[in-house]
Amino acid sequence: MKLGYETETVEFKKSTGELKEGVISISSMLNKHGEAVLYFGVKNDGSVIGQQIGDSTLRDVSQAIANHIKPQVIPTISIELIEDKNVIKISAVGKDTPYSAYGKYYVRSADEDRELLPAQLKKLIHDTVYKDKIVEIKSNKRDLTFKQLKLLFLEQGIAINEKEFEENAGLKLPDGSFNLMAELLADKNDISIKTVMFSGTNKNQIIRRNEYGFKSLISAMDQVLSYMEALNDTKVEMGNHQREEQKLFDFPSFKEAWQNACLHTKWEQLNPPAVYIFADRIEIISTGGLPSGLTEDEFFRGISRPVNTKLQKIFGQLGYVEQTGHGVPLIVTNYGKWAFSISENFINVTIPFNHELVLATEQSFTTASDKNLRIGEEPAFLTRPDSWALPERLNDAQKKIIEILINNPYATLEKLSLQSGFSVSYVRKVLDALRSKKIVERVGANKNGYWKVKKSVTIK
């Protein structure tokens, strides 16, 4: 009996005497296709000759793979009985290319393992870093429709071919099944997109949760924008008791942050972006951190490196994004770099409400069950007292920290240190002094809280 032929994902070795060569083949196949099958006890032509198996044979195979393939893969190793002969089968999958074996890099070509030249290795790394994963991941949905997406294309004057639309838009895999991007853009899906409203400045009490998902990502994104735009159109009462229209936040900045979150989220993690609305701010959360290879400095300078290239192309065709990179600089201009909290797995954009306002209105931040407000009551707003000059007993360092906190209540110790030029330990001492004078106080937890200047101050 023959097991077939060696291919770009299947390799035969006569015995574990060729263990090193087998390990190289695994890395080579993973680099080419992300999957590998290796048999010990089979000749090159597929003839089964059997593999002698001792007490440590499987352990030796496992340790060779663990010790010599980097990054590490966890294979499935089993003994199979074929024609009364034992063979060892190793199966491995991995997407963390490039994989090295014994310090070198290989790629599969037909049934051969070829060492990569420097230029080839550079290309493999580039293709891995900028891989458009959502078009490669298979959706578990088979009956997806795209009426909304097609209509949007037609509204932009873009002709579509009904028969070829799904392939032309990049919604299918080579085997004809739908990919994850198709699921995102389909008329119906299982992806939940929410805005959540809290009663105060932390997440202790939810007073409203709006669901906009389970439909095309573009439709859900638009609905969130419409809701937030309506929330922003609020009549307010200023400290001088005069009535006038005042926006709670800069809507273009929110729009850029929200559209970027929808576009650049690493959707393969199946953790959609969200909008959290507090009494004093909005937070837009997206998963995945910065795109691979993009530094924070480049990010703040507006350099764009799309996470989902084909999704960005569709957004661009439909007029939702421009590749000018002006979104982040716009937010920085309006709110400073401190509006962004960037970690390995998340980007959090914080847009504070108008500093003159603390909203406490049934229309936007409470429910009919709130004991302090009744439906139909006028919105109520709290304002800061009139400005007052800093007393002479405050030193220059204290004045500088207060000035920073007025402009950025969410500043961390590190950011206060960076902007003021003082050490973190000295900033902490300054804050302790200001707190003892009851000029500033910390509101909320260390991680999500902010600094409140109890009296509005004028820095002279």
Image (cartoon, helix red, strand yellow):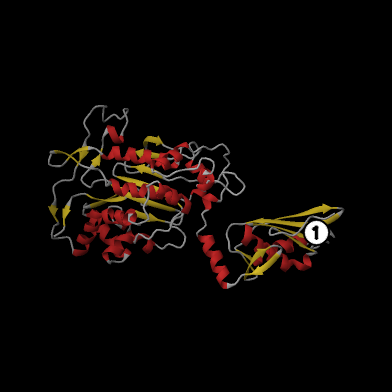
Nearest the camera: 73 or 457? 73
| Quarter location, residue 150 | top left
Residue 213: x and y in percent read: 44, 38
Bin the neighbour count of mark 1 within 10 Å (Cα to Cα): few under 14, some 14-19, many 20 and up.
some
Q: Quadrant of residue 62?
A: bottom right
Residue 174 location, x and y as percent? 60, 49
Decide if residue 411 is in sight here.
no
Which quarter of the rendered picture does the N terminus lie within?
bottom right
**Left or right side of 104 for 5:** right
Q: What residue is at 39 percent from the left and 58 percent from the top? A: 304
Quadrant in the picture for residue 34 = bottom right
Question: Residue 441 vs residue 105: left or right?
Answer: left
Q: Furthest residue to the bottom?
A: 118
Identity of the residue drawn at 42% across and 49% down:
263
Percent position (x, y) of residue 199?
33, 38
Q: Is residue 6 left or right of residue 258?
A: right
Amino acid found under the numbered disc labelled 1: Gly
Query: In this view of the protein, which residue sits in the foreground, 161 or 146?
Result: 161
Which element is circle 1 on?
loop
Would residue 275 be found to the left or right of residue 147 on screen? left
Can you give x and y, in whole percent of width and height, for residue 288 in the image?
Answer: 46, 53
Q: Which quadrant of the rendered structure holds the C terminus? A: bottom left
Identity of the residue drawn at 67% across and 64% down: 109
In the rendered picture of this protein, how many numbered marks are placed on residues? Answer: 1
Residue 348 versus residue 245 in the image, above or below: below
Please tell me whether residue 371 is drawn above or below residue 419 in the rendered image.
above
Q: Is residue 236 visible?
A: yes
Residue indicated by mark 1? 46
